[in-house]
């Protein structure tokens, strides 16, 4: 069960993600048409204006995440959100497509997705990590559907420049939400590497690379599917484009509801690997239904529904697993590489989806996506069960220096990290119960002045 601090932080950080994604996604369904009013606009430049955001994100996620492992995370999130808001303002005031491209590039430069996830990992206990990540995944999914429904309506009301102003307002509102997140100070057995050495250390870890390939594949398939499926919903299901949001929303909600039991089993019974691989199989099955049944309205909706269930399970499990598998001192760096892989997956998925639209045989297009999903399954089969840490909530000691106290805690074998929230006068102590021997338990009892049941 989450405590009040975890619930508040999860709500705030999920809202930050949702506000950013809402501002980003609202542009996508309208820009190809509404953007033609800009000076010098061409189809290629319109496409680049949409895609340059993802390119900036993919390039700058890693630098931001490297900094986040050295410095306080909250100021970096503020910087990223200010860049996002500034980019929206530059695009809103532009009269040429080049100004919009510049604005979108600036907005994408606020690449703090990994920093936000690392901050969420700091302020939640290990036992509640998957729940918190699931809430963040839900906020992203809901923002996607809401944005695709609101984008055309808002563009009709305020125009395309007004829509960019809305993204600026959302970026500033996200900064306000950050006030709900406690200030944290992280303490761990830190061994300082140069930035390049730290990045190389993360990139050499096989399981992390499998997780990076997983997020790349998931978002490649998702993006390609959302380019490929709308024309089929119109042709085979008789659902007009303006009502597609009404299709995606219930399917997404069904996916979220059905995914929760899987998430609980994965965390509570430590079956994360089995559930994870099962979700990839779900992606394959959903796509196979579309290969053979895309001409039927109900098969089309069934295939999308299965895909959404698997997608929601993966969205919750991937960041949670990543936070468990990543080295404590390089958590944000690992998440930065993962976020870059995610945005690259979306970029290549968009490119692939456009190519699939040119195919004369629809089932061949779905078959290509099935092939990609099967390669993903083979790569992921080598994943090892993640290490499970436990957490203690401790009151900060009175009359003792916090740094001295945390150093004494970290000297105990089995304690991995201490996250101090000074304003709340509490600390989360993350430990590996398997490494906590009797001597370590005695030291911990002596330090805290009472015996703890762990």
Image: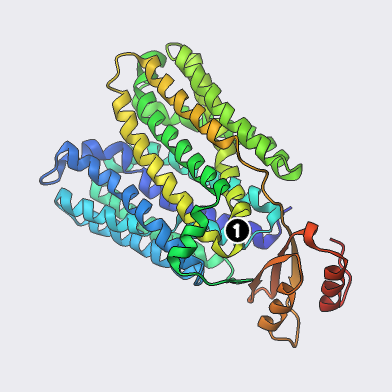
Front residue of 351/151: it is 351
- Residue beneath the point at 65% across and 59% down: 124
Residue 370, image x, y percentages: 47, 23
Q: Quadrant of residue 266?
A: top right
| Residue 181 shows up from this direction | yes
220 horizontally vs 117: left or right: left
> Which colour assignment does the render follow?
rainbow
In the rendered image, residue 334, in percent from the top left (x then y), is placed at: 51, 55
Question: Which residue in the rendered view is the most extreme toward the left?
Answer: 40
Helix, strand or loop status at disc 1: helix
What residue do we see at 47% from left, 30% from top?
Answer: 248
Which x, y percent locates residue 82?
36, 64
Q: Answer left or right for 250 relative to 440.
A: left
Badge 1 density bin: few <14, some 14–19, many ≥20, Cα 10 Å: many
Q: Does residue 77 appear anywhere in the picture?
A: no
Nearer to me, 240 or 196: 196
Q: Quadrant of residue 188?
A: bottom right
Quadrant position of the C terminus in the picture: bottom right
- For image coordinates 73% across by 74% down, the residue present is 411
Q: Is residue 351 above or below residue 10?
A: above
Counting the numbered discs, the total is: 1
In the image, 80: left or right of 12?
left
Residue at the far bottom: name it.
Answer: 399
Report which residue position mark 1 lands on. 121
Placement of 304 over or under 47, stated as above or below = above
Of residue 31 and residue 433, the one placed in the foreground of this image is: 433
Q: Position of residue 417 (x, y in %)?
A: 67, 67
């Amino acid at each position: 069960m989450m405590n009040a601090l975890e619930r508040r932080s999860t709500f705030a950080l999920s809202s930050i993600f949702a506000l950013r994604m809402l501002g980003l996604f609202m542009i996508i369904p309208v820009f190809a048409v509404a953007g033609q009013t800009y000076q010098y606009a061409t189809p290629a430049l319109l496409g680049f204006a949409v895609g340059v955001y993802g390119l900036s994100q993919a390039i700058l996620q890693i630098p931001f995440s490297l900094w986040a492992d050295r410095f306080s995370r909250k100021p970096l999130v503020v910087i990223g959100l200010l860049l996002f808001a500034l980019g929206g303002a530059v695009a809103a005031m532009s009269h040429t497509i080049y100004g919009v491209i510049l604005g979108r590039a600036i907005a994408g430069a606020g690449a703090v997705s990994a920093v936000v996830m690392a901050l969420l990992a700091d302020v939640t206990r290990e036992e509640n990590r998957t729940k918190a990540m699931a809430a963040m995944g839900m906020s992203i999914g809901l923002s996607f559907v809401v944005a695709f429904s609101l984008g055309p309506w808002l563009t009709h009301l305020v125009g395309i420049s007004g829509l960019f102003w809305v993204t600026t307002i959302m970026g500033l509102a996200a900064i306000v939400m950050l006030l709900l997140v406690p200030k944290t100070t992280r303490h761990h057995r830190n061994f300082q590497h140069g930035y390049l050495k730290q990045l190389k250390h993360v990139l050499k870890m096989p399981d992390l690379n499998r997780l990076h390939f997983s997020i790349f594949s998931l978002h490649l398939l998702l993006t390609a599917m959302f380019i490929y499926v709308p024309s089929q919903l119109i042709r085979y299901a008789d659902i007009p484009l303006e009502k597609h949001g009404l299709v995606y929303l219930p399917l997404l909600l069904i996916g979220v509801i059905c995914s929760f039991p899987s998430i609980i089993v994965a965390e509570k019974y430590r079956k994360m690997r089995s559930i994870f691989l099962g979700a990839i199989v779900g992606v394959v099955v959903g796509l196979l239904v579309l290969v053979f049944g895309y001409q039927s309205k109900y098969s089309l909706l069934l295939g999308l529904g299965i895909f959404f269930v698997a997608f929601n399970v993966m969205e919750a499990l991937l960041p949670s697993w990543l936070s468990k598998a990543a080295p404590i001192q390089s958590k944000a760096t690992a998440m930065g590489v993962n976020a870059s892989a995610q945005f690259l997956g979306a970029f290549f998925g968009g490119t692939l989806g456009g190519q699939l639209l040119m195919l004369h045989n629809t089932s061949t297009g779905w078959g290509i996506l099935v092939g990609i999903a099967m390669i993903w399954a083979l790569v992921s089969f080598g994943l090892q069960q993640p290490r499970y840490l436990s957490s203690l909530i401790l009151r900060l000691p009175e009359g003792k220096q916090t740094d001295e106290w945390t150093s004494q805690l970290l000297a105990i074998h089995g304690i991995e990290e201490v996250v101090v929230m000074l304003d709340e006068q509490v600390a989360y102590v993350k430990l590996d119960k398997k490494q906590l021997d009797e001597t370590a338990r005695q030291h911990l009892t002596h330090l805290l002045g009472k015996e703890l049941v762990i």
